[in-house]
Amino acid sequence: MDFELTAKRAIVTGGASNIGRSIVRTLAREGWSIALLDIDAPAAQSVAALVVDDFGVECRSFAVDVTDRLAVAAAMHEATTALGGLDVLVHAAGGPLGNGTFFARPPEDQERDIRLNLFGALNVAWAGIPTMVAARSGRVVIIASDTARQPALDLPAYSIAKAGVTAMIRLLAAEVGPSNVAVNGVNPMFTPPTDDEPVGAQSRWSRSGKDYWTPERRDAAVAKIPMGRAGTPQEIADAVVFLAGAGAAFINGQILSVNGGGIV
C-alpha cells in the first residue's frame, strides 16, 4: 500500500477538540487536505479556520451528530466530494457521557453511551469506507479504548461500546483488507486537553469532564500509569498519523495502545 500520494485527503470526526483537534492539526502540518466533522459547529469552524491560517492547507468543517446514521452519510458524501476523494478516515468522535457503575447509572444514560461510542463508529464506517473500497486504496484509524481490555467499573456502557468497536476494527480489517484498505485502532489512556486548548461547548470536557476530573481523581488516574503522567493529545495524534502514513503500509487489524504502560 503506497501512501506517498500527491493527493492526501482525510476526514476526521470529532476534530473540534482534544485528541481529534490534535489529529487535524498534525495532518495539516504534513500537508493534508482535511474535512473536519463534529457536532459542535462553532468549534469546528474555529479549528478549521485556524488550520487554514496556520498551515495553508484546505480544511473544511461539517456539523454532524455521529449517532444520526443518515446525517453522517450525507455529511460524509459532502465532505468526500469537497475533497475530491478520500485517502484516510479517522474516527475520533465519542467519549463517555457520564460516570457511574452498571446498576447505579440509569439505563437510558448508558444507552446514550452505546449510541455515541458504538453506533457512532458503525455509522462512520458504513458511510466512509465504501468510497475507499471502490478506489481500492485507503486507511481507516479509529480511536478505541483500553477499557475494551480492562473495563472501567465507573464507565460500564463506554467499556462495552469500545469492546464492540475493537471487534469492529478487526472484522473490517479482514473484510476490506483485500481491497487494499487497512483498518486499525488507537487506544488512548487518560488524555486530558492541555490547559490552553479551546475545547468547545459540546466537548465532554466542558460538559462534565472538568467537574468529574478533580485534582484527586487526576492524581489517582496518573498513579496507575507507570510513566507517571497523563498522555497528551499530540501523542495520540502522532500514533494516528503513523498508522495513516507510509511506514504502516503492512499494518492491518491492529490496536495500538498509547497508554504509558497503564495496561499491558
Image (cartoon, helix red, strand yellow):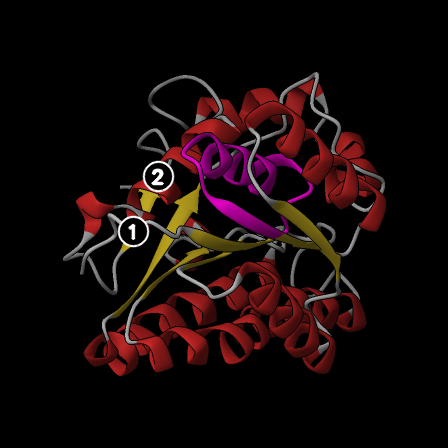
Q: Is residue 18 magenta?
A: yes
The residue labelled by disc 1 is: 5
Tag 2 secondary structure = helix
Q: Visible in this render: residue 116?
A: yes
Tag 1 secondary structure = loop
Q: Looking at the image, which residue is at 34% across and 19% down? A: 227
Q: Label 2 is placed on what type of residue?
A: Ala
Q: What are the residue bounds of the magenta stretch? A: 14-35
Relative side of 255 to 121, left or right: left
When the figure is inspected, residue 22 is found, relative to residue 10, above or below; the finding is: above
Residue 261: image location, x then y, percent? 30, 32
- Looking at the rendered structure, the number of numbered marks drawn on it comes to 2
Q: Label 1 is placed on what type of residue?
A: Leu
The residue labelled by disc 2 is: 239
Residue 203: image location, x then y, percent? 76, 43
Residue 222: image location, x then y, percent? 49, 23
The front one of 218 and 237 is 237
When the figure is inspected, residue 120 is found, relative to residue 61, above or below; the finding is: below
Do labels 1 and 2 touch, CB within 8 Å? no
The front one of 262 and 41 is 41
